[in-house]
Amino acid sequence: MNAIDLFKLRNAEYLQYVKDYLAILNLNNPQQLEIEAKLTDLTARTTELETLYKKALASEKTQELLALDERRDDAVNGIFYFLLGNTYHFETDRQQKAELLLGNMALYGSGISRLNYQAETATINNLLRDWENKSELADAIILFDLSSWVNEMKAANEEFNTQYLLRTQEYGDANPDTIKSKREETNLAYYALRNRVDALHLLIETPPSPYATVINQLNALTDQYNVLLVNRKPGSADPANREGLTK
């Protein structure tokens, strides 16, 4: 059966993939295929994972984090596009200073605002440290009068990190079952079910195998999600899965 790197799927994608996988199996007479026990186990794990995921999305602190993350993203993007515009400035000095700051941002990769939560926090801290401690960068900030933008980015990043730590503590106190650990449990159930289907298919000595049709359907599903992963832009992430849990 075709393989997929489950680790690379975002939480929402992962849940949908496994639920689709289960749906296909349920449509192909699981009792006759002798996979009911493994199917039931994966279904239970998936339901538990979905409950945790919905709880995380509904959390008041999660919504607050999303707002703070958007705020710091706006600051990062605002600075970036302001500087990008100045690379076309008619004054050579302003062009060079803009390119200097953009070059510094590029050291930390493209798409800072698309990084997962922890990576973006660390990257912004590194940028701020550079802009405060390296005289040529500090001078460029002054030239463009970017202090208010920089202060906004710093304040939003610090507030985000504070709230992120509070939410992490809240999750730890409230429930030891994190989305990450529950995904790992679900992975084990998924592989156990997939391997059973493969094994039973291989044991069929006289074709046609009763497993051939369902395997073809599952392969088609897996191929669709593999295409999604291949076409994904590096560093992209959706807000609901910015934890970095699946990276």
Image (cartoon, grey):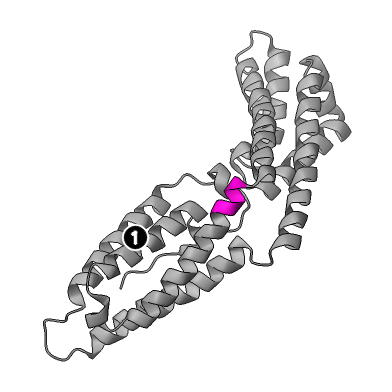
Magenta region: 54-58
Q: Is residue 56 something that shows in the picture?
A: yes
User: If the image is split into quadrants, where does the C terminus sit?
Assistant: bottom right
- In the image, 194 versus 90, the foreground residue is 194
204 sits to left or right of 75: left
Q: Is residue 243 above or below residue 73?
A: below
Q: Is residue 67 above or below residue 201?
A: above
Q: Position of residue 29 (x, y in %)?
A: 22, 74
Where residue 213 sits, quadrant-wise, is bottom left
> Residue sitting at 60 percent across and 68 percent down?
181
Q: Is residue 20 above or below residue 66?
A: below
> Residue sitting at 12 percent across and 89 percent down?
206
Q: Which residue is mark 1?
A: 20
Q: Position of residue 121 (x, y in %)?
A: 73, 43
- In the image, 103 versus 60, the foreground residue is 60
> Residue sitting at 61 percent across and 17 percent down?
85
